Amino acid sequence: MLPSIEQLHRSYINSNTTVKKVVEDILNAIQSKDKEINSYTEVFVEESLQQAKAIDAKLARGEKLGLLEGIPISVKDAILIEGHKATASSRMLENYTATYNATVITKLKEAGAIFVGKTNLDEFAMGASTENSAFGPTRNPADTNRVPGGSSGGSAASVAGDMAVISIGSDTGGSIRQPASLTGIVGLKPTYGRVSRFGLIAMASSLDQIGPFAHRVIDTAHILQAIEGKDDMDATSVYLDSSHLLDVEKISQADVKGMKVGIPKEYFIDGIDTDVRQAIDEVIEAYKTLGVEFVEISLPHTEYAVPTYYIIMPAEVSTNLARFDGIRYGLSELQNSQDLQEVYRASRAKGFGNEPLRRIMLGTYVLSSGYYSSYYGKAKQVQNMIRQDFINAFKEVDAIITPTSPHTAFNIGEKINDPVSMYLEDIFTVATNLAGIPGISVPTLSTSGLPIGFQLMSNHFQEQKLLTLAQAIDNIRYGKFNN
Amino acid sequence: MDYDVNTIAKLAHINLSSERNSMLNQDFGSILEYVNTLTSLDLESQTIPTYHTQTLREDIALDNNPRFNKNIKENIIQEMPLVEEGYLVVKSVLKK
């Protein structure tokens, strides 16, 4: 496993290694492993080495180094980095070059992070296995016959396979947490609005949120601290007052004694693999030894979360992806078409793969005259009921614990032809997005077999509590103060 | 279930091949059957507001914004499929 952010930082300032050496090691790892894993869509060899040399020169001059300076980061290929391809793993954007930086990229660049490349995803972030990529599936480093989850499967695999220290992904219905669980790393979906979405290729704008992957919980806290906050370019981003700012030092102490965690009875249902259930029980027992209290709670509208999500999300997909029409950018059949309508129809037919097509069509249907109120209108009401369930629960508890996924990583090809079965992969994660609350997936303490993650959720903007609880398990795994 | 994939494809501005037509016909039935779980909820007898996480987007001015590369207009034009004299070319909407 690669060192954490703090460990790398200490190695740099104590001259135990150089930034160039670390970046070279990462690039070598990508070269040797990624032919099989296929986590990257593009690797920035020259650019990352140049950045590394510049930071080494800064160190040689005796200048102070920021915590994120020289940290190698991979970025989901749905997030714009100016001058680099931004494909969303779609033929539609195969040759598209980003003309500006996403806000998270600007912030991380200013903090001195080194972007080593862009990572594979399910096309336009639609999928739970990264098999829907136009550039081939990504494989799980824990077992290359299995999927890494999705849609940010390339990001998860790049970190799990030690081809990046951190990755930046996006989560619309579980696309950070589910792949983190299936690959055995940490994945954080912040509260909706905490991190600017400016420069993220939109899938479902009211649900999308950018967040980090890492091996260590504390690293996700460091990254969140760097990327969060109000952004003039995203009107849905929020100003964080001092009570909601992260105290990373306090998180690292993981003082969880007296915290109360809810176990929602609707999430612990038949259909969860026995080994997943056992691994979660083991985590609950570990928490109890640290003084955490557990109570059973109810989230009564849980069974409606996935159907609600699969109405609201495609509705937003169908409107967001209407911009890909072959006129201004991306794949175009302009020269082969007779009229404007044919440009739209031919470009979109050629550019979109099967899953975006399915969701655009479904979204068009649920928004069409005669069906709007019975599908979309109703789903928006149920979304409110789901949100209220969580608000009521958080009056009683600090956080909620669930499995992230009902099972471990499944085989490549196992579910690709069964859309409903694939949609049910999101069963434990979509409610978080519908309610706009934060969620994190953390590896359980299980050390045998395939990776298993557990999910913690907290109330809006309560990432401090969420990360403190998550860090407590990291402290058991790695030892306290070993960040 | 009451749907016609050809009509939906027309509304979505997408040409459908015969293979995709049959794939969608098969998938739509099972997906709609699944999302129809919501119909078991009685929402008629209650007043439940809809929920939106989004507020209205503010206008964003590109001109002189320090966040953007000063060549952004040229870069955007470079991404366009067909350009003449600096203008985007599209097919005519109205027939002469």
Image (tube, coloured by chain):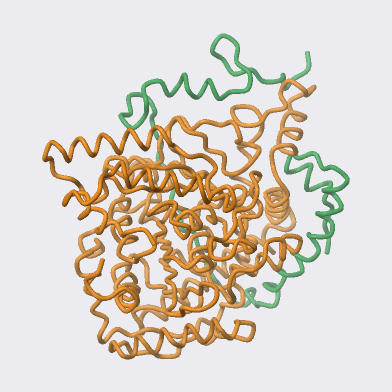
Res A426 → quadrant: bottom right
Residue A109 left/right relative to B76: left
Determine the residue positioned at 47% across, 83% down: A280
Which residue is at the far left?
A62
Placement of the C terminus of chain A among the 4 image quadrants: bottom left
Residue A39 left/right relative to A475: right
Which residue is at the far top?
B85
> Against A433, is A24 above or below?
above
* Percent coordinates x, y for residue A216 in the rendering: 35, 65
Q: Looking at the image, which is closer to me, A302 or A383?
A: A302
> Against A385, is A99 above or below?
above
Q: Looking at the image, which is closer to me, A37 or A324?
A: A37
> Against A74, is A286 above or below?
below
* Percent coordinates x, y for residue A435 in the rendering: 47, 67
Res A126 → quadrant: bottom right
* Percent coordinates x, y for residue A144 in the rendering: 60, 61
Determine the residue positioned at 77% across, 29% down: A342
* Percent coordinates x, y for residue A312 in the rendering: 60, 59
Placement of the N terminus of chain A among the 4 image quadrants: bottom left
Determine the residue positioned at 83% across, 54% down: B23
What is the letter of the orange chain?
A
Q: Looking at the image, which is closer to me, A151 or A267?
A: A151
Q: Looking at the image, which is closer to me, A38 or A285?
A: A38
Q: Colour of chain B?
A: green
Count the numbered circles shown: 0
